[in-house]
Image (spheres, rainbow, N blue to C red):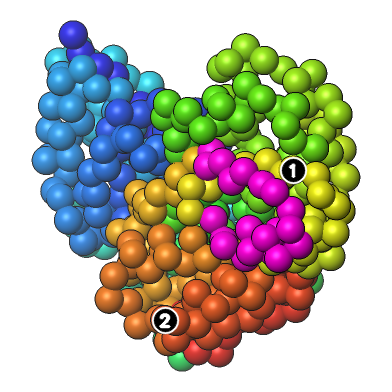
Amino acid sequence: MNGKVILVGAGPGDSGLLTLRGRAALEAADVVVYDALVGQGVLAMIPPNARRINVGKRSSNHLVPQHEINQILLHEAQEGNNVVRLKGGDPFLFGRGGEELELLAEHGVDFEVVPGITSAIAVPAYAGIPVTHRDFTSSLHIITGHTKAKAEAQIDYPSLVKLNGTLVFLMGISAMPTIMEGLLAGGIDPDMPAAVLERGTTAHQRRVVSTVKNLVEDACAAGIKTPAIIVVGRVCALAGQFHWAEDRPLGGLRILITRPRELMSAFAGRLRALGAEVVELPSIATQAIPDNTALTGAFSCLDRYQWLTFTSPSGVRIFFEELRRMRRDVRCLAGLKLAAIGPSTARALEEHGLQIDLMPERYDAAHLGGALGVAANGARVLILRAKIGSPELTRALERAGVGYDDVPLYETVYACANAELVKDQLEQGEVDYVAFTSASTVKGFVGAMGDLDYSKLNAVCIGEQTAAEAQQYGMKIVTAQSATIDSMIDCLTGLSRPKEGGV
C-alpha cells in the first residue's frame, strides 16, 4: 500500500515562520526530503526517528538533480512511508512543487500541499520594507531571476516598469547587473529606491538599500552573497524607518541550545521572543531505568523517610510517570517534606500541586546537601535523581550525619540526532553562542561534534560545574550569575554578537 507525500513550505529561514500544519506534518513523518535553503531551526524539528534525505537544492547548484528527487519521492511513498518534502519558502512559488507532483499523480500516489510563507514577502518585512503601502504602491510583482531553460529569465522590463509597483526578484543575485540594466533600459527612474536583502529572517540577515543605478556597485562593496532577494520600488526607502528585527534584545544572534528535547521548548521560546535565531540540538536524553527495583522498594516503605529530594525537572517528570505506572498518586507523599535543587525543579513540582520546603541559596548539589544537612536534623532523606549524580550532595549529608537513600530514577544518554546539520555552521562561524544547562549537555555536545576547534566556541554556562566541564575543551566561557534559565537569558541579553564569533 502506498504512503503519502506532503509538500511542506518551510518558509524563508526563521523557524517561527513554519506553519502549524507544516510542523504537524514533520512530527508525523517517516522520511523527510529537504533542500539546502531550509532553515536549521526547522531542520531541528525533524523527529529523531525520521529518516533524512538531503537533496541539497540551492539556486543552480543541485546535490541531487530534480528528476532524481521526483523518483525519490515516488519510491519512498510506494514503500508505504509518510514522506515530507520540505522546501524553502513556498512549494508552488518558483519552488518546482508542481513538477514534483506530476510523477506522483501519474502513479496514483496520495499527496498534500502545505503552503509556506514566501521570502518575497517575509524577507522585506524583516528588513523593514512593506511590499505594499497606499502612499507608494498598490501592487506587488514577483519575478524569478532564472528559468528552467535559461540561466537568465526573459523579462519584459518595459512592461514591469509601467506597472509602477513593487518588484521582487527571487534567485536573481547572479543576474543582478542584467536586471538593473534591463530596468534602466525599460525606463525606470535611475534614482528609484532598490534593495538587496541577504539571508532574510535569520539572525545574520543583511540589507543594502540603494538606488537602481547604484545597487550593483553597493551590493558588491558589501560582499552580498546568496541566498538573497532584490526589491525595487519606493517602499525600499522605508527600511531606515521601519527596521525592527535587529533591534530586539537578542536580534542578530544565533544561539545553539543543548537541553534535552522535553525541556527545550520553553527556553527556546523565550530566546526567540527576544529576537534570537535558535538552533535546537538536544545533546542528552533522559531514559527511565527499566525494572527499577530500587525505586519500587523505596515506594513500598515511604514512611521511612521525612524528606524527598529532587535534583532536576527530568527527575520530577519521571518520578510522576513511575507513580502513575504503579497506580499511585500524591496522597502517598503525605507528611513528606520536599527539597529541590533550584527554581526549575521547584516549578516542576508546583505543576503537580506540590510546594517545596527547601531550596538552597546556590543551586548546585553541594549547597543542596549542605542545606539538607541542617534542615533534616536527624531525619532520613530519599534522593531521587540520575543514575550518575554529583557526589557532592551525598558527601554533604554524610558530613552532617544525615541518613539517606540515593535512588536512581533515570540514565543520561548522550545523543545528538541532528549533529551533522549544525557542525558545518559551527565550523564556519555561523553560531554566536552555545548555551549549556548542565555538565552533561557539554559532554553530549562534545561527543557529537568530535574534532571541532572548541577554542573558538563561545559558551554560555548555567553554573560553575557546567563551566568547568566546558573549560576542559578550551571554550570561551561566560557563566550566568546564578544557575537558572532566567539568569542565562539575562546573561545572553547582556552580551553582543562576538566580533570573531563561532568556530
Using residue 138 as the reference point, say whether residue 188 is left or right of it: left
Q: Is residue 390 magenta?
A: yes
Q: Quadrant of the C terminus?
A: bottom left
The residue depicted at 67 percent of the width and 60 percent of the height is 398
Percent position of residue 106, x then y: 16, 17
Task: Name the residue that disc number 2 marks.
Answer: 473
- Where is residue 482 drawn, in percent x and y? 76, 70
Q: Disc 1 marks which residue?
A: 380
Depicted 223 relative to depicted 175: above or below: below
Instruction: Say if residue 213 shows up in the picture.
Output: no
| Residue at the image position 35 percent from the left and 29 percent from the top | 29
Residue 451 occupies quadrant:
bottom left
In the foreground, 209 or 154: 209
Task: Assess whether residue 334 is covered by the magenta stretch.
Answer: no
Q: Which residues are magenta?
A: 389-409
Amino acid found under the numbered disc labelled 2: Tyr
